[in-house]
Amino acid sequence: MKNSLSLLLVMMFAGVFALAGCSGDEEASGASGDGKLKIIAAHNQTSPDNPYQIGMEAFKESAEKSDANIEVEVHAGTLGTSESELVEKLKLGAADVVLVSPGFMTKTGIDEIDLFALPYVFDSYEHWESVVDGEVGEEMESIINEKSNNDFKLLGYWSAGVRHYYGKKPLNSMEDLEGLKFRTQTSGAIANYWEQTGAVPTSVAWGELYQGLQQGVVDASENSYPYFVQENHHKTDNGKYVTETAHDYTTRFLLINGKKFENYSDEQKDAIMKAAEASVQKEREAVNKQEEKYKQQAIDDGAVVNEIDRQPFIDLAKPLLEERAKEIGAQDLLNKINEMK
């Protein structure tokens, strides 16, 4: 009797440990209870019409249509509206796919990325696309992976449109920026550039910028039409005047945790890479369509749009680009970018 009871207890404990082991394996691999690979995909924008959301939904649709048994859960600002939060969650495994900007990525110690965020490094959307989809984009992908020790694997380059000035008065020349409290980065090469124009770089969180413009915390800001019009910045007194400076053809990085990716099956890896390609195509299409749509909406809402001679701005940026490229050891990359103009 005692032997039977002992044998029963051993079997019960063995079963408990086996279940615990299975649960741990599922958690580590991202598998859900039904055996699906569950992927948490996140970005920091909250508007359902934002190109980021359109791109992530395309990623989800493609991945889930595959035969790789994948489920994708998309978070639009619900895991955090700060890119630093998203990247931290990516490293810790609380998110699997995230979207981030060059400006933030340089804070992780990957200085070369800064090249993609500097003013007037690209002179057209076609130039930007040829760079990121070509040899330079491939080199940057390798740099990101190696310097992050495989914490970050690049899945694709998204666009966030072309960025322009908007503020309480139009710009007819660079001198009109003198003394303006301008919402942008407050340190580094980008801040240095705007300081040289005469503006005063000022830090305001994106989620607080509407109020900041409305209350005069800042006199002006900069972004692409889909982003600032969706947030109604153009309806404030300090966002009414838009000058098309076109100083930044914007790059965004779609990232996955490289270490987790290595543990996926070949079928899952293939499905994820195809989903990334689908998301790149859809997101860029959405940006291009929305540029004109939201420009027209801004005008219809009473915003005043003007063009400006960009050459003085381009000339000011040139030595800054060369200096920063030298500092971060990216002169060859900058030369290749310039050769493609």
Image (cartoon, helix red, strand yellow):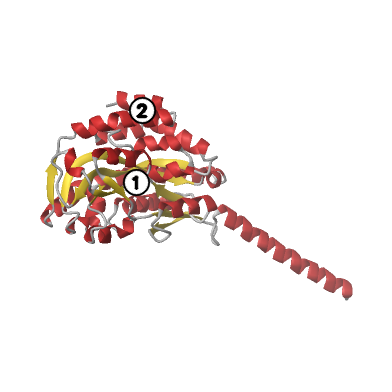
The residue furthest front is 179
The residue furthest right is 2
Q: Quadrant of residue 45?
A: bottom left
- Neighbour tally class for label 2: few under 14, some 14-19, many 20 plus, Cα within 10 Å: some
Left or right placement of residue 285 versus residue 14 in this view: left
* Residue type pointed to by label 2: Leu
Frontmost residue, 250 versus 48: 250
Q: Secondary structure at mark 1?
A: loop
Q: Which residue is depicted at the point 41% across and 58% down?
A: 80
Q: Which residue is depicted at the point 24% across and 29% down?
A: 315
Ranked by sequence position, the earlier of labels 2 and 1 is 1
* Residue type pointed to by label 1: Gln
Q: Quadrant of the C terminus?
A: top left
Where residue 78 sits: x, y (%)? 40, 61
Where residue 169 sits: x, y (%)? 15, 50
Left or right placement of residue 68 versus residue 181 in this view: right
Total tally of numbered discs in the picture? 2
User: In this rendering, is residue 8 above or below 171?
Assistant: below
Residue 69 in sight here: no
Where residue 272 sits: x, y (%)? 45, 46
Q: Quadrant of the N terminus?
A: bottom right
- Neighbour tally class for label 1: few under 14, some 14-19, many 20 plus, Cα within 10 Å: some
Question: What residue is disc 1 on?
Answer: 185
The residue furthest bottom is 1
| Cβ–Cβ under 8 Å for marks 2 and 1 | no
Q: CA distance from mark 2 to mark 1?
A: 22 Å
Q: Which residue is depicted at the point 34% across and 56% down?
A: 205
In this view, the mark in front (2 or 1) = 1
Question: What residue is disc 2 on?
Answer: 334
Q: Which residue is depicted at the point 15% across and 35% down?
A: 309
Residue 83 in sight here: yes
